[in-house]
Amino acid sequence: AYHFRIGASNSAGIVYGDNNTLIAGMTTVTTLADSGPGSLRNAIAAAGPGVTIDFATNGTIVLTSAELLINKNLNIVGPGATNLVLSGNNARRVINVAGGTVSLSGVTVREGRSTNGANGTTFVGNPIPPITGQPGAGIYNGGTLNITNCCIANNQTGNGGNGAPPYGPGADGGPGAGIYNAGILPMPRRTACRPGCPAARRAPRSRPARRR
């Protein structure tokens, strides 16, 4: 760790700022905003390979512009699945691991929505079949992804496109609403739905009334 103070000087003398600490290989998210300084999106884009990203804030990060694209080795360490939510706002995928080795812990991933498939059509007398919905609404993994102490819940893949004659019915919806794995996913047991996660709590079992 590196400790430093910023100083400013003029003819009246020199003034020092507060003590600061810089830990090599780490960056901290300080806002719940979708983008901009201190945001998770900005931290992912600016981080070098192998950097650890942690959080100095709790709450819900609502993605309003695009999915979170990761294509490098990163460690994302959240404050706990009950404390931090990454939400696709029911409008977009939450995380796309396009490459690299990524460790994700201590977050909830929910309300992701992948893209619908294209409708079938007929072009110059040649029928074109409909396309299935895109996979992986919560997380799409095309790299190596290690997940621990996370909750993945309430995500929905895109609908299949509508059919065009002579194809009749439309295509299937996309697979893997919570996580779609096209890479390596050594996921431990009970990771995708941890007890106590607010997005995945089960209703209590009903019991018959006792006779007296």
Image (spheres, rainbow, N blue to C red):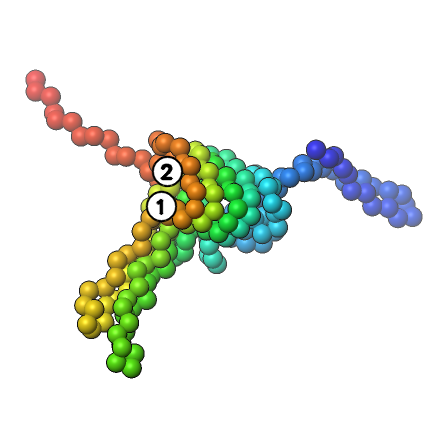
Q: For residue 206, which quarter of the picture?
A: top left
The first of marks 2 and 1 along the sequence is 1
- Residue 37 sits above or below residue 56 on the image: below
- Residue 191 sits above or below residue 122 on the image: above
**Residue displayed at 36% across by 32% down:** 190
Which labelled disc corresponds to residue 118?
none
Q: Secondary structure at mark 1?
A: loop
Task: Name the side, left or right, on which 206 lies relative to 201.
Answer: left
Q: Position of residue 68 (x, y in %)?
A: 49, 52
Residue type at tag 2? Ala
**Residue displayed at 25% across by 66% down:** 162
Could you tell me if residue 82 is visible in this image? no
Seen from the viewer's position, the closer of residues 141 and 85 is 141
Q: Residue furthest top?
A: 212
Q: Are marks 2 and 1 in contact (CB under 8 Å)?
A: yes
Task: Please identify the quadrant where the N terminus is shown.
Answer: top right
Residue type at tag 1? Gly
Q: Secondary structure at mark 2?
A: loop
Q: Which residue is mark 2?
A: 192
Task: Name the side, left or right, on which 69 lies relative to 170.
Answer: right
Q: Position of residue 184 (x, y in %)?
A: 43, 42
Q: Residue furthest left?
A: 212
Q: Position of residue 127 (x, y in %)?
A: 26, 74
Could you tell me if residue 45 is visible in this image? yes
Q: Position of residue 177 (x, y in %)?
A: 33, 49
Q: For residue 152, which quarter of the picture?
A: top left
Other residues around mark 1 within 10 Å, as few (<14) / some (14–19) / many (≥20):
many
**Residue displayed at 86% across by 46% down:** 9
- Residue 106 sits above or below residue 42 on the image: above
Q: Residue furthest right?
A: 11
Which labelled disc corresponds to residue 178?
1
| Mark 2 and mark 1: Cα distance apart in space | 8 Å
